Image (spheres, rainbow, N blue to C red):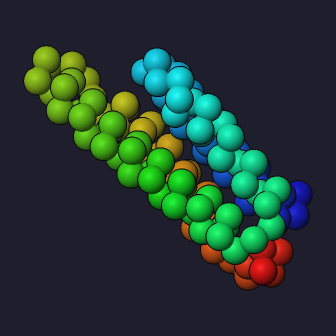
């Protein structure tokens, strides 16, 4: 898989995970937005690349907030929290990486 395809697949995976999170929360508008965001790859302008990066960074921040809230809630009720924190932290890192990889030379050349 070439580097362009890897970047696209990673972002789409992050968007799908974000959509699944919002689906579980029954926030269907955010599900639709999360699933529609990768369509910006079809619009080959620098602004779309910036919007994709902002979406990834926002989703990563959302994952971190959810992780912190989940850890706090589980600590308060005396439930184990480390596995949940590790999983959500890994998803946040994957989403952050998806955004960071869009800021590469290969991507900027395609969206110039």
Say if 20 sits above or below 50 in the image: above
- Pick the front one: 77 or 20: 20
Residue 107: tell me if it is visible: no
Q: Where is residue 91 in the image (x, y as percent from the top left)?
A: 50, 43
Quarter placement of the N terminus? bottom right
The structure residue drawn at horizontal position 63% and vertical position 74%, both measured from the top left corner, is: 103
Q: Which of these two is toward me, 24 or 39? A: 39
Residue at 67%, 51% in the rendered image? 11
- Image quadrant in which the C terminus is located: bottom right
Q: Which of 104 and 82 is in front in this view?
A: 104
- Residue 12 placed where, x, y %? 70, 45
Q: Where is residue 69 in the image (x, y as percent from the top left)?
A: 24, 34
Q: Which residue is drawn at 52% across and 61% down?
A: 54
Report the side of 58 relative to 107 (left or right).
left
Kindly give the residue lying farthest to the left in the view shown.
76
Q: Can residue 110 be seen in this view?
A: yes
Q: Where is residue 62 in the image (x, y as percent from the top left)?
A: 39, 44
Q: Which residue is drawn at 66% across and 37% down?
A: 35
- Quarter of the view holding residue 50: bottom right
């Amino acid at each position: 898989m070439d580097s362009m395809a890897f970047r696209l697949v990673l972002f789409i995976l992050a968007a799908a995970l974000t959509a699944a999170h919002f689906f579980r929360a029954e926030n269907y508008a955010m599900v639709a937005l999360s699933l529609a965001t990768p369509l910006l790859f079809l619009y080959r302008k620098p602004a779309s690349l910036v919007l994709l990066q902002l979406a990834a960074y926002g989703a990563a921040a959302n994952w971190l907030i959810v992780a912190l809230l989940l850890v706090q809630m589980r600590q308060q009720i005396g439930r184990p929290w480390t596995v949940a924190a590790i999983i959500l932290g890994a998803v946040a890192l994957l989403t952050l990486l998806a955004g960071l990889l869009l800021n590469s030379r290969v991507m900027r050349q395609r969206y110039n």
